[in-house]
Image (spheres, rainbow, N blue to C red):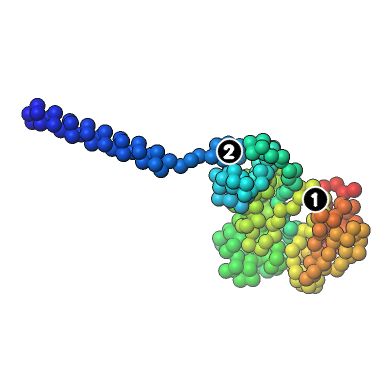
Amino acid sequence: MSAIGILAATAVVGTVGIFVGLFLGVAGIRFKVEVDEKEEAVLAALPGNNCGGCGYAGCSGLAAAIAKGEAAVNACPVGGEAVGKKIAAIMGVEAENAERRVAYVACQGNCEKASVDYRYSGVQDCRMMSFVPGGGPKSCNSGCMGFGTCVKACPFGAIRVENGVAVVDREACKACGKCVEACPRHLIALIPYKAKLAVACRSIDKGPVTMKACQVGCIGCGLCVKACPAQAVSVADFHAAIDQEKCIGCGACAEKCPKKAIVTLQPTE
């Protein structure tokens, strides 16, 4: 190729490069996405677990909602009060005191206390038990199946299966709610960390049926209701429930429960 041809080719390439550069520069200015500095600061303050426990699609989604005033500054259950105060400072608002919550598994039907209809060997997934005869090997159709679906769902390693029943590590739990969503029998709920008492059973079967299936199942006898001085306990569908807002933590309901279906989470008053 002659020198003139080389120079011509170089000129063409250079011209194209300049044109493309100018085009990209103009496009960058034209279609520039404005970045909210507060949103960026909030995102940096969030823990970055992207667990979805706040109800948004990851930390970036929550940061955008907080910056727009659509979510509370303490909406992150993982970050807790410390992160809430940091974000409140960024947003220039007062941080409300957020009540710490923790996951609780309402079942005590372990290998010794729960009856078993047959031996099971197969897929270790609670959600698959709907395809298994009787809903699983345990006689109680409302209790923990112990196959660890909640364990796999927890991003913080706060749940383990002990003797056939899921147990939550209260200190490791961040109340993200992943285990609550994962449990097919809805045995897991988020309760106040300061709660002193809880009903460890979700069975709605009649008393005789529950007693046959589990030694520690709630039979809906109502003795706990009569014993509670704060009217914090109620029974519906053969199942007791505690209103944590009314509960004074006296422990009278647990003492009267003949099946020990009400458990003490912390020292009672």
Q: Quadrant of residue 219?
A: bottom right
Position above or below: 250 against 78: below
Count the marks: how many?
2
Position above or below: 161 against 123: above
Marks 2 and 1, how far apart in space?
A: 36 Å
Mark 2–mark 1 CB contact (< 8 Å): no
Q: Nearer the viewer, mark 2 or mark 1?
A: 2
For residue 12, say whether it is visible: yes
Comes first in the chain, label 2 or label 1:
2
Residue under the image location 56 percent in, 47 percent down: 61
> Where residue 16 is drawn, which disc sits there?
none
At mark 2, the secondary structure is helix
Residue where numbered disc 1 is placed: 195
Residue where numbered disc 2 is placed: 38
> Which three-letter amino acid code belongs to the residue tagged 1?
Ala
- Across and down, in percent, residue 10 comes to 17, 30
- Across and down, in percent, residue 213 comes to 75, 68
- Across and down, in percent, residue 119 comes to 63, 65
Q: Looking at the rendering, in which quadrant would you find the N terminus?
A: top left
Between residues 140 and 76, which one lies in front from this camera angle?
Answer: 76
Between residues 184 and 2, which one lies in front from this camera angle?
Answer: 2
- Across and down, in percent, residue 13 comes to 20, 34
Residue at far left of view: 2
For residue 47, say whether it is visible: no
> Which three-letter amino acid code belongs to the residue tagged 2?
Lys
Residue under the image location 56 percent in, 62 percent down: 122
Between residues 137 and 253, which one lies in front from this camera angle?
Answer: 253
- Mark 1, Cα crowd under 10 Å, few <14 / some 14-19 / many 20+, is some
- Mark 2, Cα crowd under 10 Å, few <14 / some 14-19 / many 20+, is some
Residue under the image location 63 percent in, 62 percent down: 184
At mark 1, the secondary structure is loop
Between residues 144 and 185, which one lies in front from this camera angle?
Answer: 185
